[in-house]
Image: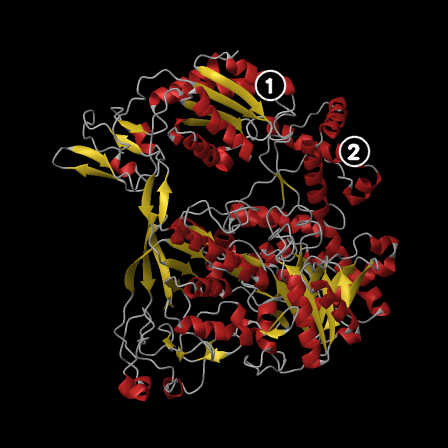
């Protein structure tokens, strides 16, 4: 979120500010380890991730919001492991103690979509819409991590929270059967061919479904779907469709500037939306 | 003899005979029976104490009767199994010996003791404590008499599917009067919608419709279609049932089924989704569900008929060409309203059937999203010659499918929806595979988790399908989508599945997907359960009294189960169960009377203060208030012995036979005084 995902951070902060949601960055946070470390050593990965949880708890926050899909999954997975396994819990807490920390499991880890739909509410979001995304056809792409294996705020097989959010912004959500299919994840870096194929399939299908833009929740998905159009064109065919963070689309509907939302960082440019209607802008 | 006076037990000294049963090894392996008998022998009042291998055997029973006479016993206690099994047996033996059968008390040392403990010493101690309680109690027993209550000879059958039809016919052919209630305009149920039946491929209509018309014309059957049971009062042998008759706006007596009115309707073309064809065909507001519907009477649907407004009231805005066409027969009657009718019956057979799983709940299979996805019930109609396409299998877009995928276990054996196996889907999927191949020549794929074909000639049918060249792929389908990966997949529905035999994920493009939907309880099963005082299992199907030995009985006497309302089953099993339910009902009504357990409550008239607090508490409305004496009275015929009033009476003036204070307290003392 500080590197390739900067646009996500910028747009998320801008949108949350507009909605009056207070956010505080976890002090001195560390990498959650992502799926890579979990695959190497689960307990050590838990220790790494739980340090973030422990700091959040120390900061007296009610909720920990994890915008990155991978962080969201790893932090939740760690919470589950600590809760379910006394052995893992004791190892992790011993490690935390050495760092002068402790973790009791009280801070829930939630996804921004969950918070926006269930706490802020669609009505409050609708009130902020100054430039409805009328006529914009959106393919909502959830990726593989936020509803699997923990389908806490949405359904695993057919999530709909982002669909409802986009509709609240005035956009048209196209039927997109690949909503939760893998984007290729880190394979684009390690084994490019199957990795790129995954991204190609998603882009191609989104266009076939009539979408003008893909809305995503994950920095890695966004990077894969946005950054490899030339390679995909060289290998298969030219499939050009912008991939925006859902928060960028929200910001556009809220009438925020493209710069504030980090839109200049995207590779595939978003088409110009009609200007804000004066009567809506006044309100 | 009256049970209501406080009879003394004659003041005689108790002479108790005690018997403990080994029940083979069932009790003897965990309880030292000889030791228990030795312990009981020295208790006050005990004249004789024995242990025996099988008390329920003829010699065991004979022994009780003989001992009563030879030793002058006046009380008997048997420690053995559950009273549910053999209380009756030992009461009879007691009576045979010349005693009132209620001078007997039973101790359960099997289900309550030997079967649930692992320490022989502790289990033996427990048996002694329980025996001592019974010895203490039986001394306070009084002679009672069972009451005989006559049984109403008619039977109500609820639900007119194959289960209800078969039960009603069996009873009617035996000369019983049957009232058959069905909520749809016709009987026939799900079976009427099927094309062929497995494994014989009999035409379902050919074997069902003759039975339907027999029901319609049988002198012993009163058919009430388009009707629902709304209230059930009374008790075994004497039920009062209220039935709601929904208005069909056609007089059943006057309509002759000529159907002249249907072409005359102001709607020139059928326009409304036809329920019988699963919405694949259309009907008019005045319709008959299918040609062999029973009764042969048309029905008017007020939701779409122009002569009704949006609220369902008669608006008289239509030209009523149907009435004209009906002419002198005058069968169409827009003045009909909902009517309620009360009937009396002795027994009730509940055969309310099932509902198929709503395939929309599994979104990844695309039902309701892709027009090429069908449910199995829709396909039954598609392959049927009387169906919406005349038996031609064509897709919603008019194409003839060249490849078809049948997905098994949709809403069955699934942690996310229904966990149970629906039992019929494997077989009907095979049947549909055969029929679809026969009708279209298409490549047919079956996607299964396990093939379950236990049944007479069922596995042979599976073998036949394998030879017919139908493909079988083992694996639960992940999704059905229309996104194409290759040229060949374009314009097709792609089934993604992990082929667990080949060990890789496959994509199989097809033109048509058939979802083999599972069986579920009816959506109103909980209401029906409450109506008839039945229980439901965890999955919502009605619960039988015993899964093995009382599969058609419920926990309410006189109410029996038949068909899929008790759990998924195929047609042969349904018919067998319906026959069994009819036999059980007949066994009840042919006896002519029921013996009521004398565990009823009565009110000590001298002590009742007339506060009326017991009256609203009685679940059987058995308590009335006598204005002349200003005291409550319990109708013994209605009392079921639940004890609610006994516990609630503020003045302690209600007493229940077999559960009197001195009996219960002495029993408690007996248990507690053992150490």
Label 2's element?
A: helix
Q: Residue furthest front?
A: B70
When the figure is inspected, residue A58 is found, relative to residue B590, above or below; the finding is: above
Q: Can see residue A183?
A: yes
Q: Position of residue B394 (x, y in %)?
A: 63, 81
Residue at mark 2: chain:
A
What x and y, as percent, mark residue B271? Answer: 45, 80
Q: Determine whether, in the image, residue A25 is placed left or right of residue B618.
A: right
Q: Which residue is mark 1?
A: B34
Determine the chain carrying the residue at label 1.
Answer: B
Distance CA(mark 1)–CA(mark 2): 60 Å
In the image, A281 versus B413, the foreground residue is B413
B475 vs B114, nearest the viewer: B114
Image coordinates of residue B336 in percent, x first then y, are: 27, 71
Q: Residue at image x 36%, y 53%?
A: B346
- Mark nearer the viewer, 1 or 2: 1
Which label number is shown at residue A43? 2
Q: Quadrant of residue A39?
A: top right
Judge left or right: residue B447 versus residue B49: right
Q: Position of residue B207 (x, y in %)?
A: 55, 73
Q: Is residue A270 visible?
A: no
Q: Is residue B215 left or right of residue B634?
A: right
Q: Residue furthest left?
A: B628
Q: Residue at x 33, y 75 (%)?
A: B252
Task: Give the residue drawn at x 57%, y 23%.
Answer: B51
> From the viewer's perspective, is residue A107 above or below residue B475?
above
């Amino acid at each position: 979120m500080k590197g390739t995902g900067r646009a996500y951070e910028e747009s998320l902060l801008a949108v949350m500010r507009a909605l009056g949601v207070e956010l505080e960055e976890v002090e001195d946070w560390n990498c959650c380890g992502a799926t890579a470390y979990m695959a190497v050593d689960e307990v050590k990965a838990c220790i790494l991730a739980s340090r973030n949880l422990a700091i959040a708890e120390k900061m007296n926050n009610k909720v920990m919001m994890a915008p990155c899909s991978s962080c969201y999954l790893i932090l939740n997975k760690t919470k589950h492991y600590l809760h379910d396994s006394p052995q893992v819990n004791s190892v992790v807490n011993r490690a935390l103690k050495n760092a002068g920390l402790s973790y009791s499991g009280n801070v829930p880890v939630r996804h921004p979509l969950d918070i926006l739909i269930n706490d802020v509410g669609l009505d409050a979001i609708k009130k902020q819409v100054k430039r409805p995304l009328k006529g914009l056809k959106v393919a909502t792409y959830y990726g593989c991590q936020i509803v699997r294996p923990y389908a806490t705020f949405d359904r695993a097989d057919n999530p709909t929270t982002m669909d409802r959010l986009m509709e609240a912004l005035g956009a048209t959500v196209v039927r997109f059967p690949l909503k939760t299919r893998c984007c290729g994840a880190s394979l684009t870096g390690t084994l490019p061919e199957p990795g790129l194929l995954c991204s190609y399939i998603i882009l191609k299908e989104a266009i076939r479904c009539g979408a003008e833009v893909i809305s995503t929740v994950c920095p890695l998905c966004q990077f894969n779907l946005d950054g490899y159009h030339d390679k995909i064109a060289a290998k298969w065919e030219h499939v050009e469709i912008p991939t925006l963070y859902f928060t960028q689309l929200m910001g556009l509907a809220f009438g925020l500037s493209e710069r504030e939302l980090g839109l200049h960082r995207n590779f595939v440019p978003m088409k110009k939306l009609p200007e804000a209607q004066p009567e809506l802008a006044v309100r | 003899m009256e049970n209501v006076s406080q009879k003394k037990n004659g003041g005689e000294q108790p002479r108790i005979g005690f018997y403990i049963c080994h029940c083979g090894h069932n009790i003897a392996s965990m309880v030292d029976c000889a030791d228990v008998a030795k312990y009981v022998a020295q208790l006050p009042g005990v004249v004789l104490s024995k242990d025996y291998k099988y008390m329920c055997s003829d010699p065991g029973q004979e022994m009780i009767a003989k001992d009563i006479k030879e030793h002058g016993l006046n009380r008997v206690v048997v420690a053995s199994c559950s009273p549910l099994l053999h209380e009756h047996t030992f009461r009879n033996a007691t009576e045979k010996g010349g005693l009132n059968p209620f001078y007997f008390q039973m101790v359960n040392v099997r289900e309550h003791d030997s079967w649930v403990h692992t320490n022989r010493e502790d289990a033996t101690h427990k048996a002694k404590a329980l025996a001592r309680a019974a010895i203490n109690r039986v001394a306070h027993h009084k002679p009672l008499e069972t009451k005989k209550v006559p049984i109403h000879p008619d039977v109500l059958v609820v639900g007119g599917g194959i289960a209800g039809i078969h039960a009603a016919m069996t009873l009617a052919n035996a000369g019983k009067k049957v009232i058959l209630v069905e909520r749809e305009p016709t009987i026939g149920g799900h079976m009427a919608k099927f094309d062929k039946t497995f494994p014989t491929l009999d035409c379902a209509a050919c074997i069902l419709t003759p039975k339907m018309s027999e029901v319609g014309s049988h002198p012993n059957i009163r058919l009430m279609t388009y009707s629902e049971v709304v209230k059930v009062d009374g008790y075994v042998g004497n039920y009062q049932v209220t039935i709601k008759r929904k208005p069909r706006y056609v007089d059943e007596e006057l309509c002759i089924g000529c159907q002249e009115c249907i072409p005359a309707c102001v709607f020139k073309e059928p326009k409304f989704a036809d329920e019988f064809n699963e919405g694949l065909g259309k009907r008019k507001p005045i319709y008959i569900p299918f040609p062999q519907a029973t009764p042969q009477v048309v029905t008017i649907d007020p939701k779409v008929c122009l002569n009704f407004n949006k609220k369902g009231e008669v608006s008289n805005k239509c030209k009523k060409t149907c009435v004209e066409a009906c002419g002198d027969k005058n069968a169409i009657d827009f003045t009909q309203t909902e009517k309620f009718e009360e009937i009396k019956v002795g027994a009730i057979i509940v055969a309310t059937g099932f509902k198929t799983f709503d395939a929309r709940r599994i979104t990844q299979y695309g039902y309701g999203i892709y027009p090429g996805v069908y449910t199995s019930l829709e396909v039954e109609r598609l392959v049927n010659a009387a169906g919406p396409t005349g038996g031609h299998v064509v897709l919603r877009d008019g194409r003839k499918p060249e490849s078809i995928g049948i997905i098994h276990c949709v809403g069955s054996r699934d942690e996310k929806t229904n966990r149970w196996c629906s039992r019929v889907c494997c077989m009907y999927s095979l049947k549909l595979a055969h029929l679809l191949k026969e009708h279209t020549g298409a490549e047919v794929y079956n996607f299964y988790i396990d093939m379950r074909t236990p049944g007479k000639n069922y596995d042979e049918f599976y073998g036949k399908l394998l030879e017919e060249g139908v493909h079988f792929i083992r694996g639960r389908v992940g999704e059905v989508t229309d996104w194409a990966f290759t040229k060949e997949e374009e314009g097709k529905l792609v089934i993604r599945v992990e082929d667990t035999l080949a060990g890789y994920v496959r994509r199989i493009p097809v033109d048509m997907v058939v979802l083999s939907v599972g069986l579920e309880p009816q959506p109103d099963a909980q209401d029906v359960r409450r109506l008839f005082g039945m229980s439901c299992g965890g999955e919502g199907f009605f619960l039988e009294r015993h899964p093995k030995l009382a599969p058609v009985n419920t926990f309410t006497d006189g109410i029996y189960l038949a068909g899929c309302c008790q759990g998924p089953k195929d047609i042969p099993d349904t018919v067998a169960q319906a026959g069994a339910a009819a036999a059980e009902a007949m066994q009840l009504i042919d006896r002519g009377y029921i013996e009521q357990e004398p565990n009823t409550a009565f009110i000590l008239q001298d002590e009742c203060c007339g506060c009326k607090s017991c009256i609203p508490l009685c679940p059987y409305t058995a308590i009335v208030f006598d204005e002349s004496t200003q005291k409550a009275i319990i109708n013994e015929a209605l009392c079921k012995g639940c004890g609610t009033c006994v516990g609630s009476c503020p003045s302690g003036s209600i007493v229940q036979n077999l559960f009197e204070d001195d009996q219960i307290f002495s029993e408690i003392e007996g248990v507690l005084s053992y150490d």
